[in-house]
Structures are given as structure tokens and as C-alpha cells.
Image (tube, rainbow, N blue to C red):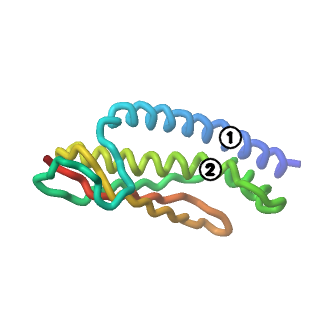
């Protein structure tokens, strides 16, 4: 009986604190995306621009985001029955958006006004049997006028 109470408590704490952290992170992402909207990010190799840059540099942004206990529990249930693991989708979305923002912030500091040939690398960092964290690296070439 005590094991069930501990399990339920950990599950509730994981849900509450994980949801709170996720909500706070999304608010931060949205605010920073608005502030950095003037720096376009293109997946194309060579942008079709009439402006010739003085030079180009490599810019990167990297982030590691941990999975909370509640998401790990839900993903375990989903693995049993199959289908989309929605609990991890928001985790990967936050990680990708955060990595792109960090890359844009680096480009802004270096005086760039455009990033092209952007690539994203995603990997999981395992803890035991399941995913413990998700790492995303965003990198691209920045134009500096």
C-alpha cells in the first residue's frame, strides 16, 4: 500500500512540476521568438539575395532538455499499446525551438541578419531503459553585412 502511495505521489509531483516548468519554458520561447523574428532562418543552401555579405560565419545553438517522471510514465504506457507518444512531442518541440533561438541569439551578437543552410540534429540521452533527456543542436551559416 505504501508503495502505491509513493508511486502516486511521484506521479502527481512529476505532472505538477513538469507542467509548470514546461509552461514557463514555452512562455520564454514565445517571448524570445518575437524578439528575434527579424533574423530569418532558411533551410536552403544558398539564399537568392542581391545583398552580398562581407563574410559568413558558422552559428550554433544547443540544448538538452530532461524528461519529467510523468512524461516517462505516459511514454511507457504508450509503448505497451503503441501509437504516438504525445508526451514526448512537446519535449522535442521545445528543444528544437530553444536550439534555434540560441543559434539566432549567437547570430545577433555577431551582427548577422540572416541564417541559411540551417540543420537540426536531435538525439536522445538514455537513462536506464527509457529516454532521460533530448539534445538538439541547430547550426547554420550566418550572413554578416
Q: Of all residues shown, which one is farthest toward the right?
A: 1
Q: Earlier in the sequence, mark 2 or mark 1?
A: 1
| Residue on which disc 2 sits | 89
Left or right placement of residue 32 versus residue 143 in this view: right
Mark 2–mark 1 distance (CA, rounded to whole Å): 16 Å
Left or right placement of residue 100 versus residue 145 in this view: right
For residue 16, above or below residue 137: above
For residue 4, above or below residue 34: below
Q: Of all residues shown, which one is farthest toward the left?
A: 54
Left or right placement of residue 25 versus residue 91 in this view: left
Label 1 Cα neighbours within 10 Å, binned few <14 / some 14-19 / many ≥20 = some
| Residue occupying image coordinates x 54% and y 53% | 66
Secondary element type, mark 1: helix
| Residue on which disc 1 sits | 15
Q: Which mark is residue 5?
A: none
Residue 32 rendering spot, x and y as whole percentages: 38, 35
Residue 68 rendering spot, x and y as whole percentages: 62, 49
**Nearer the observer, 68 or 53:** 53
**Nearer the observer, 70 or 3:** 70
| Residue occupying image coordinates x 17% and y 47% | 51
Residue 19 rendering spot, x and y as whole percentages: 62, 37
Amino acid at each position: 500500500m505504501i508503495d502505491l502511495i509513493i508511486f502516486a505521489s511521484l506521479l502527481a509531483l512529476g505532472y505538477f512540476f513538469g507542467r509548470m516548468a514546461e509552461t514557463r519554458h514555452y512562455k520564454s520561447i514565445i517571448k524570445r521568438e518575437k524578439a528575434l523574428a527579424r533574423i530569418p532562418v532558411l533551410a536552403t543552401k544558398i539564399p537568392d539575395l542581391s545583398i552580398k555579405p562581407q563574410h559568413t560565419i558558422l552559428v550554433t545553438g544547443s540544448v538538452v532538455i530532461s524528461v519529467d517522471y510523468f512524461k516517462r510514465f505516459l511514454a511507457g504506457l504508450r509503448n505497451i499499446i503503441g501509437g504516438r507518444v504525445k508526451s514526448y512531442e512537446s519535449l522535442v518541440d521545445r528543444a528544437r525551438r530553444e536550439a534555434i533561438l540560441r543559434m539566432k541569439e549567437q547570430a545577433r551578437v555577431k551582427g548577422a541578419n540572416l541564417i541559411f543552410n540551417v540543420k537540426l540534429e536531435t538525439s536522445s540521452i538514455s537513462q536506464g531503459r527509457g529516454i532521460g533527456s533530448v539534445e538538439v543542436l541547430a547550426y547554420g551559416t550566418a550572413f554578416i553585412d
